[in-house]
Every structure is written in structure tokens, then in C-alpha cells.
Image (spheres, rainbow, N blue to C red):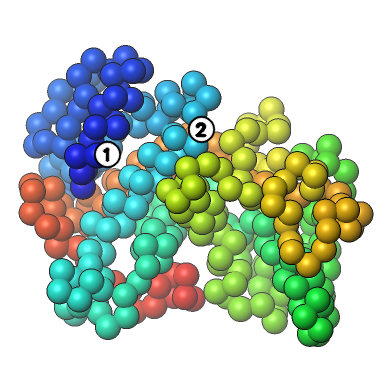
Amino acid sequence: MEGPFLAGILGVIEASIGIAEPTRFVTTTRAPAPRPSYGLNGAMGIYANYLEPRLPVVRQLASDGFYPEATLLATAMLSGMSALLWPKDPKTGAAKGPDGKGAKKQPGDRTRFVELVVQLGKVEPLPATISIPLLHQHLLSEAGLAAKAGKDSSVLRGQTQALAQLRPGLLHGVDRSVIVTSEDIDLHEDKVRKALPSAGLKLVRRFSYASQLYALLRCGLSHEFKLVRGVTGFPMTSRDARISYASRSVGELAPRPSTWETDEQFAQRCPSMREIFFRIDWLEDLVRSCASATDNLLGQDAFDGEDSPGIPRPGVWWVDGG
């Protein structure tokens, strides 16, 4: 679960923020304070033995202004758990199927990550919640691309209007000083699908918190080691909101949101864009919740140096409509 490279990075970080002795993934660990036990029959699993001692690293990095590094560690923990639950067959490279054997179709890391977060992440706001601003911006961009290609964009534009009616005055075209939180603007997928009957479930779920957490933080940071367009490391509200949005003018974004129009054209139609902010305590609680459930599903045997036995994969993954 922890390679030499990651172990070295964690050791340097832990030492730099005052953890005198870097913790390692072993059967017994020193405990600065009593911790709850979440494994089967009280056995210590990844929560008590591996992840909990490292969560202060995440918190300290964020407190010191290193939000990208903090979220990279937190999302790596989630990816590790998804790999334990649905390990790939060593011969085929595919995640094990419902019968315990290698599946014919290999699910990507995103598929497993989102499955873990949605099914095991019992936090508020729920990871399955749909980000209305990010979905709306996607539909606007797709409508513009269709128009440029000479295709009919009326359905896409109708979808953007339907979303705008769900949240009047809170989407594109508003003054950038209007700050919104998840409670103000985001919705359960059932309400979104009712407003957008022509939109597929897979499309709607692409803009769940779980999916965007992977796309914007886990994937974006892993490949570019910077925050990509669509997510921000700074909240724009003092309200007690675990997920909120920052408003950015188009001129502050690079590259521009779409290739089918100039910055000036986009700015006239959409003077600001929303970027999502995941507060670090929400991510911490998400890691804890998923780890607790993973411990209970796998038990201690999965963490004694042997390959994880995993659990059967779902017949249909959540990202595919399951």
C-alpha cells in the first residue's frame, strides 16, 4: 500500500511538521491517544493502523497553505482503499468479477474510486450530490461546440435553461460577488434528471462530488501537480460550508473555458464561472468513513502483508448507472 517513494515523501512531510517519528504500516503502532477500533471483531485495520496517524499531515499541510498537497494525500488514501476492495487480477489486469475471477472488462481507477466514495462515504454533503454549476458550465460548453460544428444545439441549450430555472439567479450571467454553497445550489440526482429528462444518468453522475473529486483533485493533481480549472484551493465565503464555490472572471482562467469562442465573447455571455471548493475537514471525514467501512468489509487479514482478497465487484458500477 505504501511504496518506497511515497514512504519517503511522507517521512519528510511528517518530520517537517513536527511528527518526530514517521509512522509506518506495521501491525502495531504507537498511539498518542486512544483511538476507536473499526476492524472486524475489534481488529485494527487501515483506519487505526495506517490512515489515522497520517490525517494530521493532511490537516497541517492545508493549514500551512499547501491545499493541493493535502488533497493529493487524502485522495491517494481513497484510491488505495478502492484498490484494496476491488484488486485487479494479476494475470489479466482486470478487477475481480462477481465470481471472484478476473472480469473481462477492466474498470478504470476512476470507476473504483467513485464507487468507494459514493457507497462507503457517509458524510454530509453526500458524495453523490450533483454539482449544478459544474454541470451547467459543461452543457454550455457542449452547446457552443455543437453550434460551431454546425450541429443542432437546441437540446443542450434547453438543458442549460432548465438548470437555470432550478436555481434562478445563481448560475452563469450573475454578478461574481454572488457566493454560493452546496446547500444553496446543488441537488440530488433525481431532481436533476426530472429537470433534464433527455440527459443520461451517466452524464449527470459525472458531475457528482465523488466524480469531480477524482477528476479535479485526484487525477488533476497526480498528472499536473497543480489545481486544474474547475476547482479552487480557497473558499470565498465565511459561512460554515464544507463545499462551496468561488466565482472567477473568465479573464482569470487559462486556458479559456471553450475553444469555440474568444475570451471576450465568452465574458459577454458568461461574466463569471464557478469553481468548487472541498473543505479539508470534509475530505478527512470522507477518508475516515470509507476506511471504517473498508475495515469491516475486509477484516484484518487484508493488512498482514498478503494481497487483499477484495470483494466482488458490482454487476453495474455506479458511474455506469448502477
Q: Which mark is residue 297?
A: none
Residue sitting at 61 percent across and 46 percent down? 231
Q: Name the residue under label 2.
A: 67
Q: What element carries label 2?
A: helix
Between 318 and 249, the residue placed more toward the observer is: 249
The x and y percentages for residue 192 are 68, 68
Residue 30 sits in which quadrant? top left
The x and y percentages for residue 245 are 68, 43
Q: Is mark 1 on a helix, strand or loop?
A: helix
Q: How many labels does the image show?
A: 2
Crowding near pointer 2: few (<14 within 10 Å), some, many (20+)? many
Residue 229 in the image: above or below residue 310: above
> Alpha-carbon distance for marks 1 and 2?
18 Å
Residue sitting at 64 percent across and 56 percent down? 131
Between 39 and 217, the residue placed more toward the observer is: 217
The x and y percentages for residue 205 are 56, 67
Between 55 and 37, the residue placed more toward the observer is: 55
Residue sitting at 79 percent across and 48 percent down? 250
Residue 16 in the image: above or below residue 27: above
Are dots 1 and 2 in contact, CB under 8 Å?
no
Residue type for callout 1: Leu
In the displayed structure, does residue 252 sit left or right of residue 1?
right
Q: Would residue 317 be visible to someone looking at this image?
A: yes
Residue type for callout 2: Tyr
Q: Name the residue under label 1.
A: 6
The image quadrant where one finds the C terminus is bottom left
Residue 21 sits in which quadrant? top left
First in sequence, mark 1 or 2: give its number: 1
Crowding near pointer 1: few (<14 within 10 Å), some, many (20+)? few
